[in-house]
Image (tube, grey):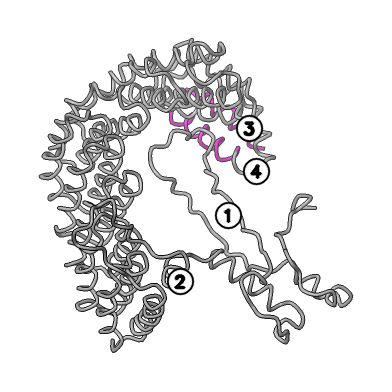
Amino acid sequence: AIERYVKQAIVDSSGQVSSSALVSSLHLFNASPENSTIVRRWISETTEATASPNEMVQFHAMQLLYQIKSNDRLGVSKLVTQYSQRNSLKSPLALVLLVRFTSKLLHDEVAEGRTPPGSLMNGSAVSKAGYQFLESSLRHKSEIVVYEAARAICSLPDIEPQELTPAISVLQLFLSSPKPATRFATMKTLAGVAAKNPRVVSKCNEDLEALISDANRSIATLAITTLLKTGSETSVDRLLKQISAFLTDIADEYKITVVKSLQQLCLTYPSKHRILVGFLSNFLREEGGFEFKRSIVDGIIGLIRAVPETTESSLLHLCEFIEDCEFTMLSTQILHLLGELGPGTSAPARYIRFIYNRVILENSAVRAASVSALAKFAARCPSLRSSIMTLMKRSLVDEDDETRDRAALVVALLEEAMAQNPYVPPPEDAEAEDIPPDAPADDDLAAFVFLDGLPMSFDKLERSLQAYVATPNAMESLELLTLSTLPIVEDIEVPTKKSISDGVGIITDGPSLIPEVEKKREKVDPASVIYAIPELASLGRVFRSSQPVKLTEDET
């Protein structure tokens, strides 16, 4: 009943009436499929509204026009081509929408294979026209249109560096803008480009260094992280001097971002690992919260895994940190790392003092972790067993049950291992090549218990035991229960999380705000169904079970 009135209002001479009618049409379109069918018939009035002299009318008309044609790829292509070549849109907001529509169209062209990855100018006619429109929008008089076009170009998939140059040149001018919002938006876009094409952004380094002292700490943090990606090996020392003064004045959340960039920089220039690890370790001794300290520890551990040359210096820095660490979780994590990597270093005995200090001075959780770390040293280095045995016997009277039990186990196993394979020190005048390696024997009991891991994960062990218990008469059986007699269960694949994006908002610089709900599924042994059938249950225990595989969709 109101259709005729709304159609008339869309082309009304009053901008307020026309804009209100277009917004109402957008709500009707999204309300239900029946309403959307009615609104699609208003396409001629909506097209006419795009020629209105009122900027807001043009903006809302472009929104509705795109909604009407959103399910028609050819229609969207014609819409973008028509308005990008006609130059009839005077509204900056409407042009921003057109830039976003063009960007989504170019993404779809590449995703669907109509344009090969790489240079868009060598692709389809739609890709060429779309990129030319985005490039021409860089010369628009409106700042918001220019930025949106530059942002759209920078987000195009697999774009060639030379095609990024016009957008980077425009963004470089925006870095000196008096508006903090413009500087922040520009920095966020450049930071995203620097992650993939650091050389293209490197020509902005002088402007980026000027932003390190920006009053807005978010802008300064982005400037530093971008410089760490685009800087050369020779500029690392100078950047670290600037960062050291900067980090003392910012919140922990910004410090964490800088630490992650420093870790990436060390992976880029491994020869600078001593300087960068020393820089990170200095901030371990400064004031900071748990998340900040954990990011540094995780960064140093990541560097140890990626650059083995950093192992010994990094372990010593971490040892100094746990001497005065207020976070139990970090102390136990570092102690576990020392037990894993310390025995393999050139001088493993130097770490014993740091670990045993934790047995004397720390809380029960850290004491228990220290005992386990010392056990690994004793297992891998027979020359240290007598010294560690003396230290372990002092923990036999520890007030904590866990620490005392671990120490008792270590002492018992070490005594048996030392009796079985006694260590004979080499002569003092022996040559270096004549000294045998400090390694346990092949049949060493301590090495087997403390160094050899389980043949399966704890999760698989739990499911395997549940499957064994579910077997009829399993608990009454006289068969010896060993790992080899347990049923074999398969690993459960964790489904990957898929990103969710709306139709037009494909350009995202920050994390998604859409909450993801994870449902815990109860683990059920697939063989339990067979045990419920008396005729099959009498055949005995299932040797192997696998997860169910659906042959059809859930709906069927």
Residue named by callout 1 = 494
Left or right for 367, reference 32: left
Q: What range of the chain is rendered magenta?
A: 1-29
Gap between marks 3 and 1 measured at Cα:
43 Å
Q: Which of pointers 2 and 3 indicates the residue nearer the eye?
A: 2
Left or right for 229, reference 149: left
Residue at 17%, 29% (x, y): give it. Answer: 234
Look at label 4 and name its amino acid: Ser
> Along the polypeptide, which appears first: circle 1 or circle 2?
2
Q: Secondary structure at mark 4?
A: loop
Residue 32 - label: 4
Gap between marks 1 and 2 measured at Cα:
31 Å
Residue 9 - label: none
Q: Quadrant of residue 14?
A: top left
Image location of residue 59, percent across then percent down: 45, 27
Left or right for 114, reference 217: right
Gap between marks 1 and 4 measured at Cα:
36 Å
Asked if residue 206 can be seen in this view, the reply is: yes
Residue at 52%, 32% (x, y): give it. Answer: 22
Look at label 2 and name its amino acid: Val
> Along the polypeptide, which appears first: circle 3 or circle 1?
3
